[in-house]
């Protein structure tokens, strides 16, 4: 586990940086900057658009009584694709573009399902909730007035 974290937090950024430097040397600064900015904008657009589509698909599956496993997984993978595209770096851009392709998402979803098979459960319950407005207080009850009081007629020192 420590090795995986080391690779994620140390080796991956170093690889991205080395690839950006190499691409900058061969393509030039402005084309590399254009690719980074363009894929960042593409990632933001993907995240914005896909969020609504995933919510609609989840709602459809839940209303039909189906477990929304595929839409949840696809939504998570598209979210990961958008995050990869928004992060600066060519490796992340390549991963993000690959995750935008539906056949690649199916393969990744199957691999994740095989890895998680039997380790978790999922249950769908449907309930009917009815909302109603709160009833106003009955008019025959007197209003409650809060305050403090002090009896002054027992206090003989204050009398003239």
Image (cartoon, helix red, strand yellow):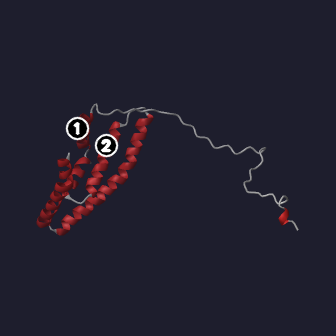
Return the residue nearer the eye: 45 or 142. Answer: 142
10 Å crowding of disc 1: few (<14), some (14-19), many (20+): few
User: How would you rate the neighbour count of disc 2 (Cα within 10 Å): few for under 14, some for 14-19, many for 20 or more?
Assistant: many
Residue 83: x %, y % from top left: 29, 54
Residue in front for this viewpoint, 145 or 125: 145
Quarter-of-image position of residue 45: bottom left
Residue 121's disc number: none
* Residue 36, quarter of picture: bottom left
Residue name at image x 39 percent, y 32 percent: 123
Q: Which of marks 1 and 2 is nearer the N terminus?
A: 2
Cα gap from disc 1 to disc 2, whole angstroms: 13 Å
Q: Please say if 104 is above or below 25.
A: above
Q: Name the residue under label 1.
A: 111
Does residue 104 appear to the left or right of 61 in the view shown?
left
**Quarter of the image containing the N terminus?**
top left
- The image shows residue 109 at horizontal and vertical percentages of 26, 39
Label 1 SS: helix
Callout 1–callout 2 Cβ contact below 8 Å? no
Which residue is depicted at the point 27% across and 32% down?
117
Examine the rendered structure and indicate whether residue 48 appears above or below residue 140. Answer: below
Question: In the image shown, does 59 or 155 lie closer to the viewer?
Answer: 155
Can you tell which of label 1 and label 2 is closer to the viewer? 1
Q: Nearer the viewer, residue 128 or 54?
A: 128
Looking at the figure, which quarter contains the C terminus? bottom right
How many marks the image carries: the answer is: 2
Look at 74% across and 43% down and name the residue there.
Answer: 138
Q: Where is residue 7 in the image (x, y as percent from the top left)?
A: 17, 51
Q: Is mark 2 on a helix, strand or loop?
A: helix
Q: Label 2 belongs to which residue? A: 74
Q: In this view, does 117 lie above or below 31?
A: above
Query: Residue at the front extreme?
Result: 157
């Amino acid at each position: 586990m420590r090795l995986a974290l080391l690779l994620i937090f140390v080796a991956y950024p170093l690889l991205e940086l080395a690839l950006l430097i190499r691409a900058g040397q061969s393509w030039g600064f402005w084309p590399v900057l254009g690719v980074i900015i363009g894929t960042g904008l593409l990632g933001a657009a993907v995240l914005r658009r896909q969020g609504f589509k995933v919510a609609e698909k989840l709602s459809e599956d839940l209303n039909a009584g189906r477990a929304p496993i595929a839409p949840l997984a696809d939504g998570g993978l598209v979210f990961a694709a958008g995050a990869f595209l928004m992060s600066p770096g060519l490796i992340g851009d390549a991963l993000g573009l690959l995750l935008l392709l539906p056949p690649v998402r199916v393969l990744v979803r199957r691999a994740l399902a095989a890895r998680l098979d039997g380790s978790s459960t999922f249950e769908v319950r449907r309930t009917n909730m009815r909302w109603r407005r709160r009833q106003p207080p009955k008019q025959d009850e007197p209003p409650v007035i809060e305050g403090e009081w002090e009896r002054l007629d027992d206090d003989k020192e204050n009398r003239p």
